[in-house]
Image: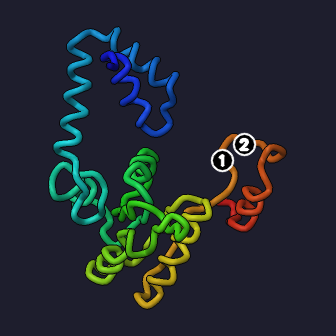
Amino acid sequence: MATALERVVAALTKLPGIGQRTAQRLAFFILSMPQEEARALGEAILKLREEARFCQECFNIAEGQLCPICADQGRDRRLICVVEQPSDVMAIERSGVYRGLYHVLLGALSPVDGITPESLRLKELLHRVRADSVREVLLATNPNSKGEMTAQYIKEALRPYGVAVTRLAYGLPVGAELEYADVVTLRMALQGRRPLE
């Protein structure tokens, strides 16, 4: 029979990116927390599971029918940024630059894994573009084979709607040194070059 500590370690190893050693460190940290902090952590996790759902409009995480971004009337409703996961919304929002709306696909195309266009929220995206007078769709899928395949599919699906389709720029990260950049990153940076402002 597993001890309470072993049960916590086993539960933590089910989280993505958490191996046995990390799970043990986290379990010991939780064990050393004041009881009120440990209780607050447990309650926060339960509350998240009970109250979080997908936004009816964009499929971001919401506590009501709409997420805070879709509910914000100050956002540019004619611009939609398409991302794979709600965590991508959080990353873009941290930049403080983007003021449009989002559409979360909840995945990326992967025929090998059985993820087809019907598995994603593509039909809902097309409906939004048609119904909301969208002028631009910014594709912010991940720069890997699945993300690229998804972006190309969406680009073709949007062709009949006459909407501008843009893609996040690729290239060198700020602070990088050219000699350490891989060939693909350099190729993308050269192809995506723009005039100096």
As helix, strand or loop, the secondary structure at mark 2 comes to: loop
- Where residue 76 sits in the image (x, y, percent)? 32, 65
Residue 67's place in the image compared with 47, above or below, is below
Tell me what residue is drawn at x 72 percent, y 56 percent: 185
- Where residue 147 sits in the image (x, y, percent)? 55, 64
Mark 1 to mark 2 CA distance (whole Å)? 6 Å
- Where residue 181 sits in the image (x, y, percent)? 77, 48
As helix, strand or loop, the secondary structure at mark 1 comes to: loop
Answer few, some or many: residues within 10 Å of disc 1's Cα (few below 14, many 20 plus, some between 14 and 19): few
192 to the left or right of 146? right
Contact check, label 1 and label 2, Cβ < 8 Å: yes
Please state which of residues 86 and 5 is positioned toward the viewer in this rendering.
Answer: 5
103 to the left or right of 143? left
- Where residue 196 sits in the image (x, y, percent)? 69, 60
Looking at the rendered structure, the kind of residue marked 1 is Pro
Looking at the rendered structure, the kind of residue marked 2 is Ala
Residue 195's place in the image compared with 186, above or below, is below
Picture quadrant where residue 143 is located: bottom right
Residue corresponding to mark 1: 173
Residue 176, which numbered label?
2
130 to the left or right of 24? left
Quarter of the image that includes the N terminus: top left
127 to the left or right of 36? right
Quarter of the image that includes the C terminus: bottom right
Answer few, some or many: residues within 10 Å of disc 2's Cα (few below 14, many 20 plus, some between 14 and 19): few
